[in-house]
Amino acid sequence: MSLTIRLHLAAASAAAAPRPASRRQETGRAKLRNARPGAIYHADPLSHLARRPKMLGRDAVRTSPSSVIRSSLIDPDGGVLVDLVVPERDRALRAKEAAALPRVGLTRIDLEWVHVIGEGWASPLKGFMREEQYLQSLHFNCLRMPDGSVVNMSLPIVLAIDDGTKDAIGSSRDVGLVGPDGDLVAVLRSIEIYKHNKEERIARTWGTTAPGLPYVDEAITPAGNWLIGGDLEVLEPIKYNDGLDHYRLSPKQLRKEFDRRQADAVFAFQLRNPVHNGHALLMNDTRRRLLEMGFKNPILLLHPLGGYTKADDVPLNVRMEQHSKVLEDGVLDPKTTVVSIFPSPMHYAGPTEVQWHAKARINAGANFYIVGRDPAGMGHPTEKRDLYDPDHGKKVLSMAPGLEKLNILPFKVAAYDTVEKKMAFFDPSRAKDFLFISGTKMRTYARNGDNPPDGFMCPGGWEVLVKYYESLQAEETKQQAAVLST
């Protein structure tokens, strides 16, 4: 599939040097620099930011006109960005050593977690969790560092094995990790094996053990009854060879790109759905307000989730093509937007999971994180209601331990304005004029070949979705014909 989004790596290479700040801007930035950390959870999320921000990284605000603006705006968790990929010069030797070790097979989701850990998205985590780390994550949603500080770690990142694999490992201290295609991809050293209490893990992560939780059905229920933790060494960068690897920028690469663009603020937006004009309104409005606050070059990190998603979600390749049309049509500005894939699997664990999403973006260099209604949520698997309170995600983020240095930006609700015939921020005083188009309703429009109201999504992006659902229907028709013929 031909994709046209590019990182525009050459677009801003000759960015102008920063101008001296005005006295008003200096005063506002001084307030930002000296303010104590606190939640920025307001109906208008940016209106009080200059008075009560969360603490930024030490390089977030520069007051000297001659200083170089850097996008290393926020320190990674633990102070150092983890990179567990073996240097190229050592790979042949490590691979030879790994070939002689007992082997642990990885599922596709396990491989995605190897990718996540190896590139430092979960910094300071350096491998699959041992039991002490697992219990801290499961019960406290954070890890305590040697200096007594805590970092957020709301999701257990673990590797399950079955009885046969445990027996085969025996007394070995190290194991080789084998990907779904049979290739050795990593080594796990100084291992620890402990019991996998699935019911406890599910109950504490999702707040329910109801049947039908997608990640549970896919990755936990069929998994083994043991967990194996240890220090990870990734033998070479993880590649999927799906035509999208050039979008999978590591935290290190993203930080370097933000530095190259001379960003003085980075605001991250995660999504697992196609971008409609309401999303774009939110992202463009956020940038406008950051500029009004005195920031000179805020950069948007448009960061679609690229790991496991449930079967009825729009596939990654279709979403990436749709995102490319959004940039081509000028709905978002390529010069101020970095599009990259976040490799994490999706849990649909609501307020617990949204902390992980925010924490990972700290490690990628973002110092602002946009959060909306019911982040990482889903419908209850057995009842006709939301599984989580739609407002709890943003409230939890504003209080979560270990996320104090990240500015949380809850966004205003956008809906389709039937009078203005465009996506707009919802006005309660004329609620009857607004139409809320959910992701489910959007997919129904596309599946039925119906057009949404004008102004809901750019035409090129909508065409991508319609073609995808047409291809699904054609495949279903073909399968039904094959069944009838037999």
Image: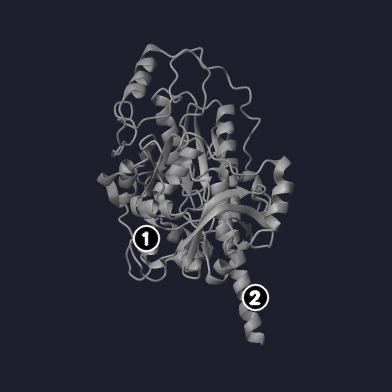
The residue depicted at 43 percent of the width and 29 percent of the height is: 57
Residue, far left = 429
Amino acid on which the number 2 mark rests in the picture: Lys
Graded by Cα atoms within 10 Å as few (under 14), some (14 to 19) or many (20 or more), the crowding at tag 2 reads: few
Of residues 417 and 395, the one nearer the viewer is 395
Amino acid on which the number 1 mark rests in the picture: Trp
Identify the secondary structure beneath mark 1. Answer: helix
The residue beneath circle 2 is: 478
Of residues 165 and 447, the one nearer the viewer is 165
Quarter holding residue 258: top right
The residue beneath circle 1 is: 206
Q: Position of residue 482 (x, y in %)?
A: 66, 81
Q: Position of residue 234 (x, y in %)?
A: 62, 49
Q: Is residue 225 visible?
A: yes
Q: Position of residue 192 (x, y in %)?
A: 50, 57
Identify the secondary structure beneath mark 2. Answer: helix
The label on residue 370 is none
The relative height of residue 294 versus residue 378 in the rendered view (above or below) is: above
Q: Position of residue 486 (x, y in %)?
A: 66, 87
The residue depicted at 58 percent of the width and 41 percent of the height is: 83
Contact flag, marks 1 and 2 (Cβ < 8 Å): no
In the drawing, does residue 149 fall left or right of residue 461? left
